[in-house]
Image (spheres, helix red, strand yellow):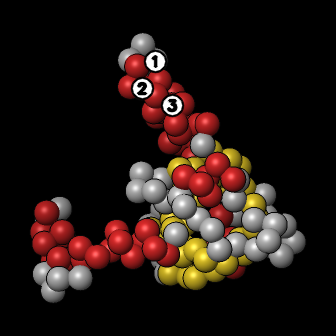
Amino acid sequence: MFPFFVGTYEHNIDEKNRITFPARFREQLGEGAYIIRGFDNNLVVMPSTRFKQLSDLVNALNFGDPDVRDFQRLLFSNASEIEFDKNGRFIIPQNLRGLAKIDGAVVVLGSGEKIEIWSPELLRKREEHFESPNAVAELAKKFNLSF
């Protein structure tokens, strides 16, 4: 069973490229965490146990397939183990900050079994299509969800 992350927090990257992570999220990460490139020009943080599970699935794919090699390369070359300092901060590597267009302010949000880190501008653009009154209901309907 993996931790369950919820909530949205706004933070800033300091002059040493560190981010202070929400205490609640740090506590839930427990045994450690990894940060990887997300699929939406964002970054994803996941507990070490979840990253190991993902790694096992990706490594079990057919290495003879060029798409598999590309995916493995993109996943693992853009992954970094997180090391928190005594103040709950960690450095987001330069390559990942560049991929996610992060410079200064960031939004940290819980997304179930993972945590996402976004540039506020890119997140705002991503969420624009949910501004219509029925957008969320239509998306839930697509997955046969009701609440």
Label 1–label 3 contact, CB within 8 A: yes
In the image, residue 71 above or below residue 97:
above
**Residue at image coords 47%, 24%:** 69
What is the residue that sits farthest to the top in this orientation?
64
Viewed as shown, does residue 68 lie left or right of 52? Answer: left
What is the residue that sits farthest to the right in this orientation?
86
Which residue carries the number 2 mark? 68
Rendered-image quadrant of the C terminus:
bottom left
Between residues 21 and 131, which one lies in front from this camera angle? 131
Residue 115 seen in the current view: no
**Residue at image coords 53%, 58%:** 100
Q: Residues within 10 Å of mark 2 (few under 14, many from 20)?
A: some
Instruction: Give, as a three-letter code, the residue at label 1.
Output: Phe
User: What is the x, y in percent for residue 112?
Assistant: 44, 67
Q: Which numbered dot is residue 63?
A: 1
Which residue carries the number 3 mark? 72
Labels 1 and 3: the sequence-earlier one: 1
